[in-house]
Image: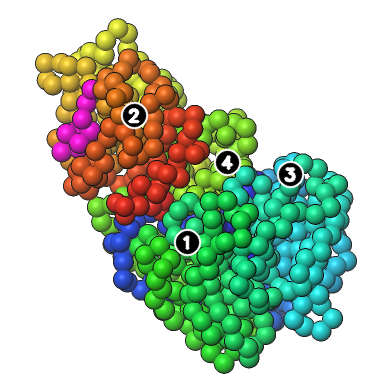
Amino acid sequence: MRSKGSRLPPWLGVPSLAAIGTLVSIWAHAPGSNAGREAAFQYVVIDAAGPRDPWLKSAGDLNGDGRVDLIAGGHEGGGLVWYENPSWKKHVIAAEGEFSTDGEVADVNGDGHVDMVVVTSKELLWYEGPDWKPHHIDDVVLHDIEVADLDGDGRPDIVGRDQSAFGKHSGNTLHFYLQESPSCWKHLTMPIPNGEGLLVTDINRDRRPDVVIGRSWFENPGGDLSTTGTWPSHEYGGNWDYPHVYAAAGDINGDGRVDIALAPSERDGGKYRISWFEATADPRTTNWKEHVIEDEVETAHHFIGIADFNADGQTDVVTAAMHQAKSPQITLYLGANHGSQWTRQAVAQTGSHSMRVVDVDGNGLPSLFGANWEGVKVELWRNVTRIRRAAVPGVGMELWTYRTQLKADLPGTLGMIRALGFTDVETGSYYGRTAVEFRKLLDTAGLRCGGIFTEYERLKNNLPEVAAEARTLGARYVLVADIPYTGHFTAADARRAAADFNGWGKRLKSEGLQFAYHPHGFEFEPSARGTAFDILMTETDQGLVTYEVDTYHFLEGGADPVKYLKKYPGRFALAHLKDMAKGGPARLAAGTAGRETSVTLGSGMVSWQKFFAAAGKAGLQVYYVEDDSADAPTQVPATLKYLRQFGIVPNGGGK
C-alpha cells in the first residue's frame, strides 16, 4: 500500500487529498529547535462504536469548512461514515456495503463538491457529494487505489491493484481507469510483479504522476494513455525482494528529490526490514542507495508514513503493525542527520492498519488517524508537540519564481513545489482563477498561502474585497510592493504612504490580518532624515505595519539589508531570499526585473552568514525563496542545498 497523507501527497490536479491541508508544519518551525525531543500525542477515541472491521480509512474536507474530516468504512457492517472535525459528529455516506481497504477524496465530476472513490469486496465505485449518490465504475477486486489526473486532461483517473498474500487474490496487475466522463471510464491493465502495495507520486519531477510498487516504479509516458500499452519500469530497490509492502514517498534527506520508504505489510509471523531508498539525480537509474531504518521487524507493518512529527525540521518515519502481530506497535522513527540516524519512539502498543497522516488541527502538526482492521473502534493520535520557536524562521516559496510554469500548468507546478518540500507559499497572482478556485488547488497540493500581494490603489479603493480574498486563501499577510509616485520618490511620497499604511494596517488588523510592505529599491532615495525608507519606518506604527526585506532589491537600491535589520529590529516579519550575481551593479535602475542577475543563493553578492545572524536577532518569522531567473527551476534545488548548511529547510511559515 501507499502512505496516504504522507509528506508528499498523491499527484496534484485532483483533490484526492483535498483540504487534508498541510502535511508538514505550516508554522515557522526552527530546524533544530525541537531537536532531540520526542513528539507528543493525545489519544482520542473518535468513535467507540464505529463501522465493524473498519478496513477503510481516509480523510478530506467533506463539508468545505477548511478542516480535515475523517472517514471510515466497515467490511462487516456499519457502512461508510465520516466524522465532522472538530466535534467528530458522525455522518453516513452509505449505510451498507463490504468496504475494503481503500478510499480517496476527489472531485470526480468537477462540480466543486468533493466525492468519494472507494473499493468494496467486489466493486469499484464513487459516491457523489454532498448527497452521496453511488455510481458504479467496475466489478473488480482491488486492495489499493490511487486517484490522480494520470493523462493530464483535468479529470481524475484511478489506478488500482489487488494483493497476493491471501487465497485467490493476485497483485500482478495494475488496473487503470481513465475518466472519459463521470459515468464512462476506460479500463486498461498492465502486468507487474506479483505482490501488494501501490503509491502514486511524481518520482522524476516531470509534472506527470508515476506509479510506485515495492522495488520498482513505473514512469508515466505522457501523451494519450488510452493507447499506451505499458509504462516504462525502473528499479529503485535492487536488494529488496519482499513482495508485500506499504509504501511512502517524500524528501527524506532534504536534497529536493523524491525518496521512497517501504515496510513489509503481509503476513504476520515473518521477518524483514523497514528501509528508505535515496533517489538519485536521475531516478531512472538503478543505483538508489538503501538505508535500513530497522532490521528484523515482523512482516505485519500495514502502514508507513513520512512527515516531521517533532517539528525539528528533520523528516521522520512512522509505521504501524497490525493487531495480530506479536508486537502490535505504532512506532515513530525520529530522523536526524538527513535520514542517516533514527531514534525509536513508541506511540501506542495497540497497533493499527492503513493509517492516515493528517493535520486535524490546522496548526501544521501531523497527527495519526487509524483503526485496527478488526473491531469497531476508530482512533486518532493527535499531535500536541509543543513547538519551541527559535531564531530560524520557516521557509516557503514565492510563486513568482515559477511564474512561467504556473501559467502553463498550475496544478502540476504546485505539485512540483510541494514535492520540493514546501508547504507555505506567497503569491501575487491567482493565475486566472478566483480566490476560491485557487484555494482549492492549494489545498489539493497540500500547500498553505501565507501571504498575498495586491496593488496599492486596489487596497486604497477596495480593502474589504482584498481582505475577503486573504481570508479565503487562509493568508495572514496582505502585502503591497509598490507606491505610486512621479519622478523621484520623495520624503512627501513616503509620509503619504506611511499614513496609508497605518490606516490599512488598522483596518486589516480588525479583520485578523497583517499589513506588510515589500520595498523594491526606489525607497532608498536619500532624504533629510536618512532615506525615504527611514521615513516609512519611523512614521508607521509597529503594531500595524510590518515589512518584508528582499535581499536582492535592497542591493538594487544601494542598501545593505543587514544594516537595516540591525537598525530596525522587530520591524521585519518576512524576507525574500534572493541573490545577485557577483559583479552585478550594486544599484540598478528602478524597476529592473533583475532576471539576468538573479542567481543561486551562495553564488552571488549577499553575505548570507551575516544576513541570517542579523535576521535571527531582528525577529524575522518567515523566509520565502524567490528567484527571478528564467533558470529558476534548476537553480532552486541548489539554493535549498545551500540553505541546509544554515539549518534552513522548506518547512512552512506564514502563520
Q: Which residues are magenta?
A: 556-566
In this rendering, the label closer to the viewer, 4 or 2: 2
Indicate which disc, 3 or 4, sits on the residue closer to the N terminus: 3
Q: Which mark is residue 581?
A: 2
Mark 1 neighbour class, 10 Å CA radius: few under 14, some 14 to 19, many 20 or more: many
Indicate which disc, 1 or 4, sits on the residue closer to the N terminus: 1
Which residue is the site of mark 4?
413
Q: Viewed as shown, does residue 400 lie left or right of 542? A: right
Amino acid found under the numbered disc labelled 3: Gly
Q: Are marks 1 and 2 in contact (CB under 8 Å)?
A: no
Residue that appears at 31% across and 71% down: 36
In this rendering, the label closer to the viewer, 1 or 4: 1
Query: In the picture, residue 325 is in which quadrant?
Result: bottom right
- Residue 102 drawn at (x, y percent): 70, 68
Q: Are marks 1 and 3 in contact (CB under 8 Å)?
A: no
Q: Is residue 515 visible?
A: no
- The number of numbered badges drawn on the structure is 4
Indicate which disc, 1 or 3, sits on the residue closer to the N terminus: 3
Which residue is the site of mark 3?
222
Q: Are marks 3 and 2 in contact (CB under 8 Å)?
A: no
Amino acid found under the numbered disc labelled 1: Ile
Q: Nearer the viewer, residue 260 or 19?
A: 260
- Residue 108 vs 528, above or below: the answer is below
Which residue is the site of mark 1?
252
Q: Nearer the viewer, residue 223 or 506?
A: 223
